[in-house]
Image (cartoon, rainbow, N blue to C red):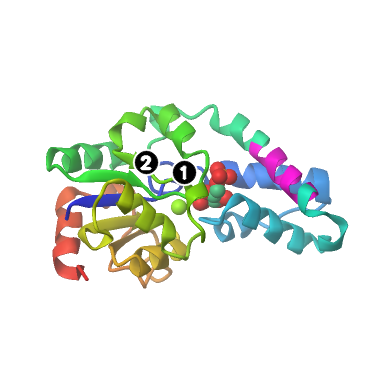
Amino acid sequence: MKGVLFDLDGVITDTAKFHFKAWSKLAKDKLDVDLPASFETELKGVSRIDSMNKIIEFSGKQADFSEAEVAEMAAAKNDFYLKEIDKLTQKDILPGIENLLDALSANNILLSIASASKNAPFILKKLGLFERFDAIANPENVEHGKPAPDIFIEAANQIHVDPRECVGLEDAVAGVQAINDAKAVSVGIGNAEELNQADVVVKSTADLSYMLLDQAYGEHRK
Ligand code: G6P
Ligand code: MG
């Protein structure tokens, strides 16, 4: 194992609740609909514009908006979201993550971010983790979002490592598929049934360790 590719939202910090709060406000203000709680999981790993389109589809008002208006609404959501995540601090790093980063770096493993979020650099700075990563893949430079493997391949390229020499960490089903199709070893974090396509699943970020990742790599490398 030469590199570890990290999803951000739900792996390093829990931003799903802030995304959902911002989308809910946007949906109420601009589309006059209440989003069901299930949207919080449904939008995990889905890009900003694709999330916007899913919500418009849910409201049944597709015919009412031009492409420019859709982009404007997505930008308004991001403004709410930025206000929410401005409160993030080091305390919002998920359990076990700082220890994991220490152990990986001590073993000369390169660390790269493979997130669909254009706010990843801002979030990592808020958490005090920006300097800890060797690279952050830019989602604007990849053609297809998760479940396509593009962002994980880009994250591996950024650290000059073959994805086959990497382990990827994900909390979303689409993300696990993306890691598998990038030919890296996938470690899912969350419900084992839901993430059954992952090579290895742990319940929580607190269960992650250098040993676990190294062993997963040894057993499941492609
Ligand atoms: C992550 C989140 C999604 C979010 C996407 C884009 O994948 O799980 O909920 O829509 O990033 O985030 P952004 O910060 O660019 O709007
Ligand atoms: Mg995630």
Is disc 2 in contact with disc 1, using a CB cutoff of under 8 Å? yes
**Magenta span of residues:** 69-78
Considering depth in this image, is 20 or 66 the residue closer to the camera? 66
Ranked by sequence position, the earlier of labels 2 and 1 is 1
**On residue 172, which mark appears?**
none
Residue 210 horizontal side relative to residue 48, left or right? left
Q: Is residue 89 above or below residue 174?
A: above
**On residue 94, which mark appears?**
2
* Residue beneath the point at 84% across and 60% down: 61
Evaluate whether residue 24 shows in this view: yes
Kind of residue at disc 2: Leu
Q: CA distance from mark 2 to mark 1?
A: 7 Å
* Residue beneath the point at 42% across and 28% down: 125
The answer to whether the residue bearing label 1 lies less than 8 angstroms from the nearest atom of ligand 2 is no
Q: Is residue 32 above or below residue 54?
A: above
Kind of residue at disc 1: Asp
* Residue beneath the point at 29% across and 33% down: 132
Residue 153 occupies quadrant: bottom left
* Residue beneath the point at 25% across and 49% down: 160
Magenta segment's dominant SS is: helix
Q: Which residue is mark 1?
A: 14
Q: Is residue 69 above or below residue 173?
A: above
Q: Is residue 61 above or below residue 122?
A: below
* SS of the residue under disc 2: loop
